Amino acid sequence: MTTPAPTSDAAAAVQALPAEWRDFFALTKPRVMTLVIFTGLCGMLAAPGNIHPVLGFTAIFCIAIGAGGAAALNQWWEADIDAGMKRTAARPLPAGRMQRTDARDFGLLLSATSVGVLGLAAGWLAASILAISIFYYAVIYTIWLKPRTPQNIVIGGGAGAFPPMIGWIAVTGDITLMPVLLFAIIFMWTPPHFWALALFMQSDYAKVGIPMMPVVKGQASTRKQILVYSILLVPLAATPWFIGGTTALFGIIALVLSLAFLALALPVSFRRSENGDAMKPEKRLFAFSIIYLFALFAALVADRVAFYQGWIS
Ligand code: HEM
Ligand SMILES: CC(C)=CCC/C(C)=C/CC/C(C)=C/COP(=O)(O)OP(=O)(O)O
């Protein structure tokens, strides 16, 4: 089998690693975690206050390896499920390229290291929240909720919403309304992000018996619920502006992005079935969900930098 050509310098560097290292790297779900790390970084950059650059870099590195450790534990637990789904069958464990215990030990090592080092670098409040988010993803979501309830994403989505809060608290040392709002925005964003994908991956989840919303409640109900969360996201995303935590710069960008998100959710919500177009609206909404969160958090940082520099008020 030929190896696909790397698409960037980072991809080329990963390809150059020994195969075994590449598999450990893959266990951290690096593509998904880019956005987790980015939102954590933005939380840190947007927070009022300063952190020494070395400590700031260490804190972001800890969020990255903590998230990676949780992802490894997720795959250790789900190796059999992953083997049954086309999207996940080539992962290191289901493909038989790694021992399950190695994945478990790697996940535990990354998780413990990330929490310990973050505690020393940025304080134990930030480290405790990182520990909670790792536990939330690896245990509450993966082991408890995911195989049991179609609300797995709604409740479990909390895990991925913590990183900006961790970044923020690494700077300020305390929990205020702004980091809670950043948490709430990702929490509200997660169901439409994931259910858009679940609509076109429904058969995979059905095959392995995971009770994702479209499998249990059907497509029509899932589409309706995507609409509800997308509508609620519009005012919620602009709330940092409404409470005076940002200027109108962020508020207006948040409203424009959220209305664009809603505009893409509408065709997904108001159709009955695939309509023979290979689920294009669902795929478009899923792809935009990722651009949306990158852009929203970038706008938050731009707003805060412009404000602290005195360029806007
Ligand atoms: C319980 C919550 C979530 C679930 C179940 C979920 C599920 C998924 C799934 C199944 C994929 C397909 C990618 C793959 O095959 O590995 C995906 C992609 C992605 N997710 Fe999520 N997600 C959740 C929350 C989040 C959060 C909180 C973030 C970041 C803040 C995020 C960022 C991403 C990104 C960046 C991708 C695209 C990865 C790529 O380019 O391949 N997700 N998500
Ligand atoms: C700091 C910290 C611990 C952050 C965790 C971030 C987090 C919870 C991200 C969730 C994103 C994710 C990979 C979901 C995949 O769901 P899945 O595992 O059900 O998907 P799969 O079917 O691809 O395995």
Image: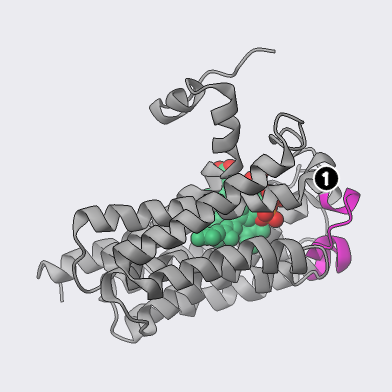
Where residue 152 sits in the image (x, y, percent)?
73, 68
Task: State the residue in front, 151 or 18.
Answer: 18
- In the image, the segment drawn in magenta is 205-221
Where residue 82 sits in the image (x, y, percent)?
78, 44
Compared across the picture, whether 99 is left or right of 162 comes to right
Q: Quadrant of residue 188?
A: bottom right
User: Is residue 45 shown above or below 242?
Assistant: above
Residue 23 shown in magenta: no
Residue under label 1: 80
Does residue 71 appear in the picture of this structure? yes
Q: Quadrant of residue 215?
A: bottom right
Q: Residue at x 42, y 61 (%)?
A: 116
Task: State the residue in front, 17 or 192.
Answer: 17
Task: State the residue in front, 247 or 172.
Answer: 172
Quadrant (top left, top right, bottom left, bottom right) of the C terminus? bottom left
Compared across the picture, whether 246 is left or right of 10 comes to left
Where residue 261 sits in the image (x, y, percent)?
53, 62
Quadrant (top left, top right, bottom left, bottom right) of the N terminus? top right
Residue 212 shown in magenta: yes
User: Is residue 130 shown above or below 201?
Assistant: below
